[in-house]
Image: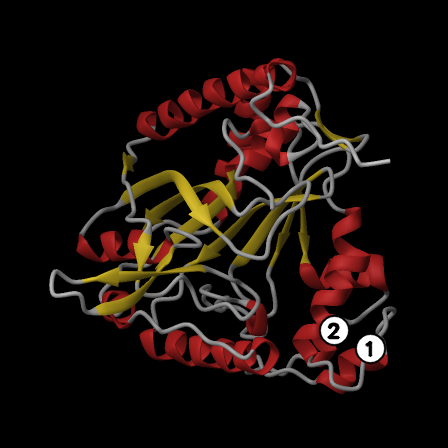
Amino acid sequence: MPQTRPSPWWAPERHADRRPFLTARNAITRAVRRWFEDRGFTEVEAAALAVSPGNEAHLHAFATEALTTAGEASTLYLHTSPEFACKKLLAAGERRIFNLGKVWRNRERGPLHHPEFSMLEWYRADEPYEVLMEDCAALLAMAAEIAGTKALTWKGRQADPFAEPERLTVAEAFARYAGVDLLASVAADGTTDRDALAAGSPVRVAADDTWADVFSRIIVQKVEPNLGFGRPTILYEYPTAEAALARPTARDGRVAERFELYACGVELANCFGELTDAAEQRRRFEAEMAEKARVYGERYPVDEDFLDALAIMPEASGAALGFDRLVMLAAGAQRIEQVLWTPVPER
């Protein structure tokens, strides 16, 4: 028997099922903009095309070809985040900004992932990253209030969006949920010891795994499934080796000013006390691209313009929140396509 094709998203009966989630999305969108404007933020709009889509090893972009009027070709990418553009605006003199818009990530599709989705990013110049923790808690509560729900839900799991989030360091989470002394594998200067982490690992470790591979597997298998139940969780102070674009903490060079927000086991936001050391950021980018070349056989260019801007950017804190996931949990949707007005076709 031939398989019956599922009805498309635009089929009237499917659209009728999705429409309550979509109208909740619109209401939350309006409320988010008001929330930031009431606090003196300026809305900005980052260009979608960029010379570099970002320099994380396991992040995959959509590439396109730009032609000059003479027909000369160069590669541009759909951005995976407006981060580089927003930080250039901070260097230009902006103080409090937010960007709510589309981003694109390749090789991503599932209940919580879509190749095109909406990212809410905001930045505060000369403000500590702990303020972003308060922002995240306020936005969660507001989204739930707008959607008329008392609990964020996903796959039968719940979290009270109005409760004060639990604050848990990554080291505490490794000890609690994996029985691992994470910082025993991190030296004072932030360098890591793969064998020390592998020796106590409760998950499978392959011979060619790096420290980062083992760290990621423990996070995904042992830590994340336990976060954000009953109330949201703020997982903070990532090891400096996993800092991405965050600066080390002043009190301990082994860990960085980075936190992620979880609710119902779902990661919602990734936030940094921003690194402004251009030389260190270049080193991190180059290391990430070397790893990308090793694993995937490709690398993305470094945005030299971004590094130039970073050198004059003020101290700042920044957050990136998956807006569609926020709507999903607030409205009770089970798949990201339910909160997207026009999902990308799946081939």
- Quadrant holding the N terminus: top right
Between 121 and 183, the residue placed more toward the observer is 121
Residue drawn at (59%, 36%) of the image: 325
Q: Earlier in the sequence, mark 2 or mark 1?
A: 1
Q: Helix, strand or loop at disc 1? A: loop
The circle drawn on residue 205 is 1
Residue 257, given in percent of the width and then of the height, sits at: 51, 60
Q: Are marks 2 and 1 in contact (CB under 8 Å)?
A: yes
Where, by quadrant of the figure, is residue 111 drawn?
Answer: top right
Residue 110, given in percent of the width and then of the height, sits at: 67, 45
Q: Is residue 301 left or right of residue 148?
A: left
Where, by quadrant of the figure, is residue 196 drawn?
Answer: bottom right
Residue 329, given in percent of the width and then of the height, sits at: 65, 30
Q: Is residue 265 above or below residue 326?
A: below
Q: How is the image coloured?
A: secondary structure
Pointer 2: what residue?
214
Q: Is residue 341 above or below residue 135?
A: above
Between 116 and 325, the residue placed more toward the observer is 116
Three-letter amino acid code at the position of disc 2: Val
Q: Is residue 157 above or below residue 167?
A: above
Residue drawn at (33%, 49%) of the image: 48
Residue drawn at (36%, 65%) of the image: 52
Three-letter amino acid code at the position of disc 1: Val
Residue 122, given in percent of the width and then of the height, sits at: 39, 43
Residue drawn at (60%, 22%) of the image: 144
Q: Is residue 30 left or right of residue 334?
A: left
Q: Is residue 133 left or right of residue 112?
A: left
